[in-house]
Image (tube, grey):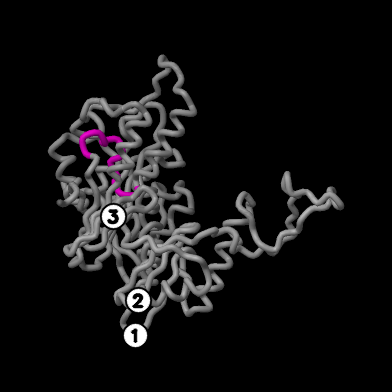
Amino acid sequence: MDVKSTFLNGVLHEEVYVAQPEGFVDPHHPDHVYVLDKALYGLKQAPRAWYDTLTKFLLASGFKKGTIDTTLFLKRQGEDLILIQIYVDDIIFGSTNPKFCKNFSKIMETKFEMSMMGELNFFLGLQVKQLPEGIFINQAKYIKDMLRKFNMSDSSIMKTPMATGTLLDVDLSSKSADQKVYRSMIGFLLYLTASRPNIIYLKGTPDLGLWYPNDSCFDLTAFTDADHAGCKLDRKSTYGSCQFIEDKLVSWTSKKQNSVSTSTVEAEYVAATSCCSQVLWMKTQLRDFGYNYRRVPIYCDSKSIIAITSNPVQHSKTKHIDVCHHFIKDHVEKGDIEMHFVQTDFQLADLFTKPLDEKRFKFLISKLGMLNMPS
C-alpha cells in the first residue's frame, strides 16, 4: 500500500513560515510569507508530522502500537491478528484472516488517497517470494546492482568470504582508500545484511537467501562467540551472535568490541552480554505477537563464561570488567535466559567471527537456513 502525497497529510504543531514561490508572488504584498498548517515536502518536520497523523488515525481505529517497534501496529479480533508495518509512505500489512486486510484497505481509503500495490514481492531492496510452503527472502537484484556500481561484475568467484590463514592487521605501506567510495560500499554492504550475513561472499551466490517454511515452530534460541581474528596490535576482538526461531535465522550481529579485553574469557563475556541484550529485545518484540518466552537458551563454546554468569560472587578475575557488562548475570538469576555449552563444531556464531574453510562454511550456512532461491 502506498500513500499518495504522503507528507501533505501531516499536520504541523510548530510555527513554520515559507517564502512566496517565484512566479506566484503577490504584487501587493511581496514581502509577506506563508504560515503553514500542514507539512510540505522538504521540511524536516514532514516525516514526523506524517507519522503523528497516521498514528492518531490507527489508534483511533482500534490498533495498538508495538512495545518496542513504534512503526508496528497490531489489532486482535478473537483468534485473528492483523499486523501493519510503516515505512514513511509505504505500508505493509497482513492478517491471519484475509477479510481483515480488505477491511483495513477500506478504512485507509476513507482517510487517505491510497494506491494498492498488490501482494508483497519487492520492498526496499528485499525480494520476497511467497509460496504455499513458506516465504523466501533475498536481495539478488540489489547484489547485482551493487556489483555493477563498484565495477565488480567481472570479478572472480570465491568459495568462502575469507581465506583461513588471514590475520587482521594494519597495512601501513598501502595508500589510503577513497573515503567516498569506501563509505558508499560499506553502506551498501550494511543494508545487504537484511537478508544474509556473509556480505563479502557475493559474486557466486547472488540468489542465496533465507527460507522460512510455514510449518516452523516458535522456539527462540541464540548463539554467541568472540574471536581476536589474529590481531597483533590490540586485544579488541570481534564478536558475533545469532538468534533463531525454531531453526530459522531471524537476527544476527557481528562487530568489533568497543572495549579492550585483557583476556579471551573477558572478550567472550562481553559478547555474551551483547547477545543477551538482543535476546531480551526480541522477547519483548515477540510478546506483541502473542509469544511469551522464559529461559531462552544462549549457546556458547566457553564453559568459563557459563560459570561466571552463574556465580553470584565477584572475584579478582572479573572485578575489572565494566559494570554494564554484568547485567547478563541478573537475567540468568531471574530466569530470562539460560547459558548452555555447545561444542565448537556446532557453534553457529563462528560464521560471523572467523575465516573458515569451504566445508565448514557451507555446513554453517545450511544450519542458518540459507539456500538458493526455490523455483
Classify 206 as above or below 284. above
Q: Main secondary structure of the magenta part?
A: loop
Percent x, y of residue 127: 30, 51
User: What's the mark number on residue 78?
Assistant: 1
User: At which x and y percent is residue 90?
Assistant: 45, 59
Query: Magenta stretch: residue 209 in it?
Result: no
Q: Are marks 1 and 3 in contact (CB under 8 Å)?
A: no
User: On the image, which quarter does residue 147 sit in?
Assistant: top left
Nearest to N terminus: mark 3 or mark 2: 2
Q: Residue at x 25, y 31 (%)?
A: 162
The numbered mark, 1 or 3, whose residue comes first in the sequence reads: 1
The residue that mark 3 highlights is: 128
Label 2 sits on a secondary structure element that is strand
Q: Which residue is identified by label 2? A: 81
Residue at 50% across / 74% down in the picture? 110
Q: Amino acid at mark 3?
A: Val
- The type of residue carrying mark 1 is Gly
Magenta range = 194-205
Residue under the image location 39 percent in, 50 percent down: 124
**Along the viewing direction, whichever of 309 and 362 lies nearer the viewer:** 362
Asked whether the residues under the numbered discs 3 and 2 touch, taking CB atoms below 8 Å apart as contact, a structural biologist would say no
Amino acid type, residue under disc 2 in the picture: Leu
Question: Foreground residue, 332 or 190?
Answer: 190
**Residue extending farthest bottom:** 78
Q: Is residue 93 left or right of residue 13?
A: left
Q: Quadrant of residue 249?
A: bottom left
Quarter of the image where the N terminus is located: bottom left
Task: Report x, y in % for residue 365.
Answer: 20, 46
Between the C-alphas of marks 2 and 1, the distance is 8 Å
**Residue at position x 26%, y 58% from top?**
244
Let me know if residue 198 is in the magenta part: yes
